[in-house]
Image: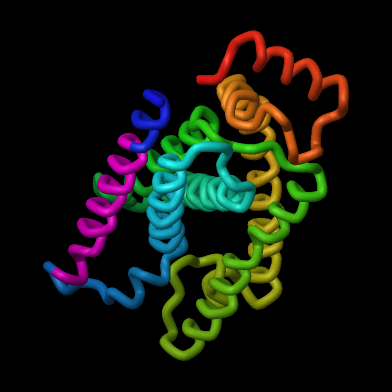
């Protein structure tokens, strides 16, 4: 019970900090008028941060319920964690390239939170938070592939909007800046492979987390998901009976 309350409070705090970072990131549109709010909202970082806030709020509500977390919610948390992690990783690479070329790359505190602090919290929360059920191999593969749906839609929409407005949020999605349509397709394919790898890696870390093991054992002693072999299932049920519920 204490773990659930602490997790809920931390998630709410993370949502609040994320909201603050998004608001201050938008000061260029609302305060200084130096950018367009439509262009700002087109960044994948902004959209993935909003998705994190929504999923974090939903998962906090489910903490108030007894029993294991629904598999779809665990999948959503895994995918969103991968989104913000990839966003932060790409941003770090762009920062490195800017430093290599001698270009000035200013990073305000709001951007640091969205690109670095948020991915770190999302990953830690996924590893230690209670209620994450196990998923079968087929479910994990389906999860990794379904994670491509939103980025694919974002890519198509951003490309069409870029043609109409002559503005792109990232160089690798602009045919002119990237070096042609072929280069854009190459970048997008590479990022798709990276995202699938990150989703599978994040889920592997979640499953190997000792904290996650304890919560699955306590919250779901019967292991109705059917993903564990009989010997492993019997051993974990015995541990649950000997330790008692939380």
- Looking at this view, is 36 or 66 the one in front? 66
- Residue at x 51%, y 87% (from the top left corner): 163
Q: Main secondary structure of the magenta part?
A: helix
Tell me if residue 28 is in the magenta stretch: yes
- Residue at x 26%, y 47% (from the top left corner): 16
> Viewed as shown, does residue 98 lie left or right of 34?
right
Residue 185: percent from the left, percent from the top? 68, 70
- Looking at this view, is 200 or 140 the one in front? 140
- Residue at x 62%, y 70% (from the top left corner): 152
> Viewed as shown, does residue 136 lie left or right of 200?
right
Q: Residue furthest bottom?
A: 164
Q: Residue furthest right?
A: 230
Q: Which residues are magenta?
A: 9-30
- Residue at x 42%, y 79% (from the top left corner): 167
The image shows a total of numbered marks equal to 0
Q: Residue furthest top?
A: 242
What is the image's colouring? rainbow
Residue 44, compared with residue 84, is above or below; it is below
Tell me if residue 161 is in the magenta stretch: no
């Amino acid at each position: 019970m204490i773990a659930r309350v602490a997790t809920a409070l931390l998630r709410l705090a993370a949502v609040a900090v994320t909201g603050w970072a998004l608001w201050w990131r938008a000061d260029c549109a609302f305060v200084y008028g130096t950018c367009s709010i439509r262009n700002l909202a087109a960044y994948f970082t902004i959209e993935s941060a909003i998705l994190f806030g929504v999923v974090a709020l939903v998962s906090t509500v489910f903490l108030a319920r007894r029993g294991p977390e629904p598999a779809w919610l665990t999948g959503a948390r895994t995918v969103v964690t991968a989104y913000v992690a990839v966003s932060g990783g790409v941003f770090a690479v762009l920062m490195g390239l800017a430093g290599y070329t001698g270009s000035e790359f200013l990073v305000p505190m709001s951007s640091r939170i969205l690109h670095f602090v948020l991915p770190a919290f999302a990953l830690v929360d996924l590893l230690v938070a209670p209620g994450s059920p196990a998923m079968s191999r087929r479910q994990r593969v389906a999860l990794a592939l379904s994670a491509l749906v939103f980025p694919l839609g974002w890519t198509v929409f951003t490309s069409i909007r870029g043609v109409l407005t002559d503005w792109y949020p990232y160089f690798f999605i602009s045919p002119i800046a990237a070096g042609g349509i072929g280069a854009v397709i190459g970048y997008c394919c590479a990022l798709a492979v990276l995202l699938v790898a990150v989703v599978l890696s994040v889920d592997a870390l979640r499953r190997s987390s000792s904290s996650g093991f304890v919560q699955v054992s306590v919250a779901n002693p019967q292991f109705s998901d059917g993903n564990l072999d009989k010997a492993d299932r019997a051993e974990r049920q015995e541990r649950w009976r000997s330790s008692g519920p939380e």
